[in-house]
């Protein structure tokens, strides 16, 4: 015959089986982008264009410049864009804007929500085309 402790342990184990069967919630893919165009995608925009809801795009330290590394659009996707080390002083998007060629870091105008995350980045050198 089982002791009370053994019975409770067995019941607890049975109660946890459905939770274990569920596993962890599905996590998206993680993509790496580097300032020199290496990584999984050569630019930030290309990584976002290929990402799906739940994915994470990690930027390695350095300065991101040029086409497709500024004026970035998320297209309403629930994704996370962040620096790999969460250090905004080490991961910079330099828009290199001029009054003749305005540029900004991001345009969030396609229904993005709090599920769209931008973290650990510095955006510099931007000029809004609206100014």
Image: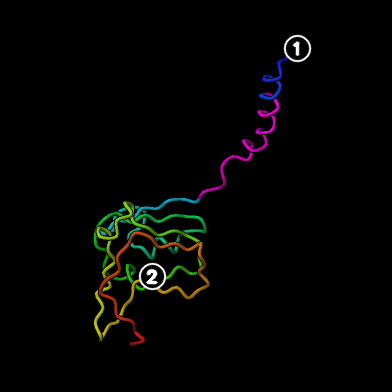
Q: Which residue: 36% across, 63% down?
A: 44
Q: Which residue: 33% across, 71% down?
A: 70
Q: Nearer the viewer, residue 52 or 61?
A: 61
Q: Which residue: 25% across, 86% down?
A: 100
In the picture as drawn, the residue positioned furthest to the top comes out as: 1
Q: Which residue position holds label 2? A: 72
Whether 64 is among the magenta residues is no
- Residue 89, placed above or below residue 21: below
Residue 36 at least partly seen:
no
Residue 131's quadrant in the figure?
Answer: bottom left
Nearer the observer, disc 1 or disc 2? 1
Count of picture labels? 2
* Residue 20 spot, x, y in % from top left: 62, 35
Dot 2 lies on which element? Answer: strand
Residue 101 is labelled as none
Q: Which residue position holds label 1? A: 1
Residue 126 at least partly seen:
yes
Magenta-highlighted residues: 10-27
* Residue 26 spot, x, y in % from top left: 55, 47
């Amino acid at each position: 015959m089982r002791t009370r402790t053994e019975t409770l342990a067995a019941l607890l184990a049975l109660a946890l089986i459905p939770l274990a069967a569920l596993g962890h919630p599905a996590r998206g893919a993680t993509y790496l982008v580097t300032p020199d165009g290496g990584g999984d995608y050569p630019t930030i925009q290309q990584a976002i264009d290929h990402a799906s809801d739940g994915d994470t795009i990690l930027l390695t330290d350095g300065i991101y410049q040029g086409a497709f590394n500024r004026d970035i659009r998320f297209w309403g996707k629930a994704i996370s864009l962040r620096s790999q080390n969460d250090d905004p002083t080490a991961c910079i998007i330099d828009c290199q804007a001029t009054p003749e060629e305005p540029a900004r870091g991001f345009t969030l105008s396609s229904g993005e929500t709090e599920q769209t995350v931008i973290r650990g980045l510095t955006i510099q050198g931007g000029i809004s085309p609206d100014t």
